[in-house]
Amino acid sequence: MLCEGPSAFLGRYELLGHSRGPVVAVNRAIAFSHEIPIDFWATTDDPLNLWEWAQPSLHEGTRLFSTRNNLMAWEALLPDIQRLYHWTSTYMDELAVGDELAPLIPTLFPVLAWCLRQGAKEVRLLGCDMIGSGTPGIDFRPVADEGHVLRWEVERRLLALSHKQYRTQGSRIVRWPMSKPRLQ
């Protein structure tokens, strides 16, 4: 599973040697399709937000992963909905502010749950750094702003729980050593 963290950008030429089996690109990590073959592109955001941006990196055979709440948007975009795999949407209700919608669980975690359900015995996380603010190659800053500090705390807890769930199923998540947090 290829994430869009700074280690993936810094180690982009080493990514191919560390991937095994089908490669899932999470969100903007689809941009690595020119260096590493991508089998799935996963995004739980509204696909219209990234669709045009992702076009140069998507090939006709790339399968797609999203959540059920986005199925209608995907149907409008795709001539063949058969290339879309989906999972139930999960909201973080306790983080909703006022009348705003609660944020979705970050894309990585529905994909991890789906992979485990598909019988994956090992998932390698590349570029899953959980550091800084913004997106590498676009607007990345090595110091996390207040919102990203909260986001990374939540994601680290969810990743720990995902590791535990994988172990209970006889599977494992392996995090790329280059993806261990170094910057704060």
Image (cartoon, rainbow, N blue to C red):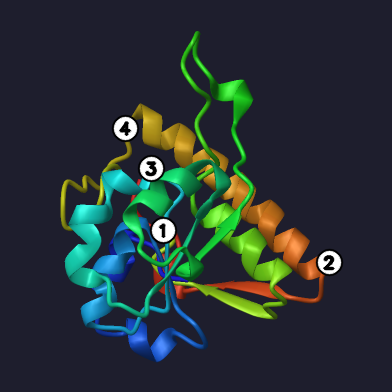
Name the residue that disc number 2 marks: 168
Q: In the depicted view, which residue is nearer to us: 60 or 96? A: 60
Q: Quadrant of residue 55?
A: bottom left
Q: Amino acid at mark 3?
A: Asp
Whether residue 22 is visible here, answered yes or no, is yes
At x 30%, y 77%, the residue is: 60
User: Decide: marks 3, 1 in contact (CB < 8 A)?
Assistant: no
Name the residue that disc number 1 marks: 129
Q: Which mark is residue 46?
A: 3
Q: Residues within 10 Å of mark 4 (few under 14, many from 20)?
A: some
Of the image marks 3 and 2, the number of the one nearer the N terminus: 3
Which mark's residue is nearer the viewer, 2 or 1?
Answer: 2
C-alpha separation, residue under disc 4 versus residue under disc 3: 24 Å
C-alpha separation, residue under disc 4 versus residue under disc 1: 15 Å
User: Decide: marks 2, 1 in contact (CB < 8 A)?
Assistant: no
Q: Which secondary structure lies at badge 1? A: loop
Of the image marks 4 and 2, the number of the one nearer the N terminus: 4
Name the residue that disc number 4 marks: 145
